[in-house]
Each structure stands twice: as C-alpha cells, then as structure tokens.
Amino acid sequence: MKRSKLNAIFLATSGALMAFSANAIDNPGAHQHGHAELQVAVDGNQIDLIFTSPAYNLLGFEHRARTDDQKALVKETEEWLERTPLINTPDASCKVASAEVYHEAGDGSGDHHDHGSNGHDHHEHNEHEHSEGYGHSDFEVTQVLNCTGLASAEALLIPLTERFPEIEDLGVQWVWSGGQGSARLEHQERSFSLKSQ
C-alpha cells in the first residue's frame, strides 16, 4: 500500500481521533527519546498501521551508521520491522502483507525498504545529512497486516517495547468499526484492547 494512501486513511477516518489523542496522551512532542507512536486502522481482518520512533529508541544512535557493527544493527532492525507484525492477536494470527521502512540512519544506500507491495512509487530521500551533526533521525514503518480471528481477540499484543527497551512509552491511536481510541503504554505494557474505550 502506498504511504500516501495509508496516510489518507488516517486523515479520512481519524480527524477527531487526532484531536482526542492530543489530550488523551498528553502530546509528548514530535521527537522525544524514549517515546514512540503507533497509529492503527482496523477494517475487518486487516490492520493498517504507521509506527514512528526516534532512531535512538531502536538503534541507540541517530547518525548514519558508520561502523560495521552499526550497519549490521541497522540492517537487523530493518529486517525485524519488515517481517514482524507490530500488532498481533494472542494466537499470533497476523501476517505481514506489506511493509515499508523509512529512516536516515543507514549508510545512504538502503534508507527505504519496500516489501510486499506492488507498483509502489519509490520514496525519494532528501540527502540532508544528520550524520555529521546532532540532527534528529526517525524511523517510520508502515505495515498492512492480515489477521484471522481479529474480531474475537480480547486484546492486541505489541512486541515493540520488548524488542526495543529504549522505548519507555508508546502512544497508540486506533480507529475501527466500533469507534476510536487511544492509550499510552508504559514500558512494561505490551497489549491494548480496541474495546477498552
């Protein structure tokens, strides 16, 4: 799914959610180490999501990868974000249909990864260098998930804070046929319920 199409889903269905969430989760700011955001749209057995986080939360640094170890960590993180459903049912029924990872922490040759979507217009990267200065670098991940048994799931699981311990809190916003809601998950919390709001 094109990134712009996914963004359009959120704009079309969650204008009120955005206003609500600013109050509900204290709007901690655009780039804050320790904080990340997850936006979720549920339609039947499909979940569309956008995950955004400072690179520091995922890598421990924000500059472009310089050493072989840093480059390996970036690649490992990209691969994990591409293949792992960032939301899942308790019986792990969600499968990644498509995933895209955008960031500026790579070596410049692999800053956009697109897996599973056909006919995608590739994102042009601005080569504004954060690597030599103290600029901020973020990850943005879009996923489309297919989940059987989604309607009967009491809770949805999020593996992000377990995999990335630098994420101290995760703001989650969602829209689905039953309404909309938001939650702020602290570091040890790994699940939320669409029906809790």
Image (spheres, helix red, strand yellow):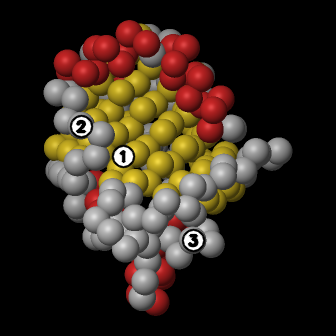
At a point 45% along the width and 16% down the height, the residue shown is 14
Task: Tell me the number on the disc at residue 158.
Answer: 1
> Which percent across, then down, holds residue 59?
34, 69
The quarter in which the N terminus is drawn is top right
- What is the C-alpha distance between the residues marked 3 and 2? 27 Å
At a point 53% along the width and 76% down the height, the residue shown is 107
Residue 55 appears left or right of 14: left
How many other residues sit within 10 Å of disc 3, few (<14), some (14-19) or many (≥20)? some
Total marks placed: 3
Residue 193 appears left or right of 94: left
- Mark 1 residue type: Ile
Q: Earlier in the sequence, mark 2 or mark 1?
A: 2
Dot 3 corresponds to which residue?
A: 108
> Which percent across, then down, holds residue 177?
50, 12
Q: Earlier in the sequence, mark 3 or mark 2?
A: 2
> Which percent across, then down, holds residue 125?
60, 55
Residue with the most extreme right position: 119
